[in-house]
Image: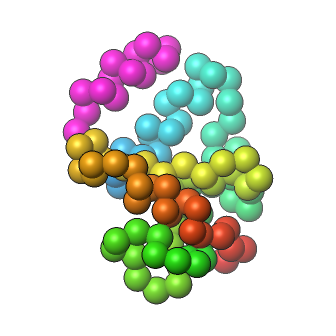
Amino acid sequence: MTLEQFVEEWSRLELSERSASQEHFIDPCHPLDQPTPGTDSAGENYCFEKRVKIVGDASKGSKGDHGFVDVCKRGFFAWEFKQKDKYKSLDDAYRQQTLGSVSKQ
């Protein structure tokens, strides 16, 4: 898949966050020659659904003291996917990433 094909394909899909987030992340990794979370076999430093300790109101629906970030590469980035047209802004995604800390659990 080229990056142009990625944009074309994903701009017309209406999948939920749960249905689309992992494939949406993996698709551009290949043409950019970047590793995917599956290359970290233990999931310690790069994985999907990384458990984070919530240190504030991470999102409107958060419950308890732990949550999950869609993709995390420790020391590099966190990625939070949000369903197209479900949110007016990406404020919830930003809160989930900045108000959580990656836990070893």
- Residue in the picture at 25% in, 33% down: 13
Main SS of the magenta segment?
A: helix
Q: Residue at x 68, y 73 (%)?
A: 103
Query: Where residue 43 sits: x, y (%)?
Result: 69, 59
Query: Which quadrant: the C terminus?
Result: bottom right
Residue 38 appears left or right of 76: left
Residue found 24% across the figure and 27% down from its top: 12
- Magenta-colored stretch includes residue 44: no
Region rendered in magenta = 1-14
Q: Residue 76 location, x and y as percent?
A: 73, 47
Q: Is 55 placed above or below 29 here?
A: below
Asked if residue 88 can be seen in this view, the reply is yes
Residue 61, picture quadrant: bottom left
Residue at left offset 40%, top offset 82%: 63
Horizontal arrangement in the rendering, residue 105 relative to residue 4 (left or right):
right
Name the spot of residue 8 as percent of width and height, x first. 33, 18
Can residue 42 be seen in the rendering of this structure?
A: no
- 2 in relation to 49, above or below: above
User: Residue 101's image quarter?
Assistant: bottom right
Residue 9 forms part of the magenta stretch: yes
**Residue lying furthest bottom:** 64
Nearest the viewer among 48 and 97 is: 97
61 vs 43: above or below: below
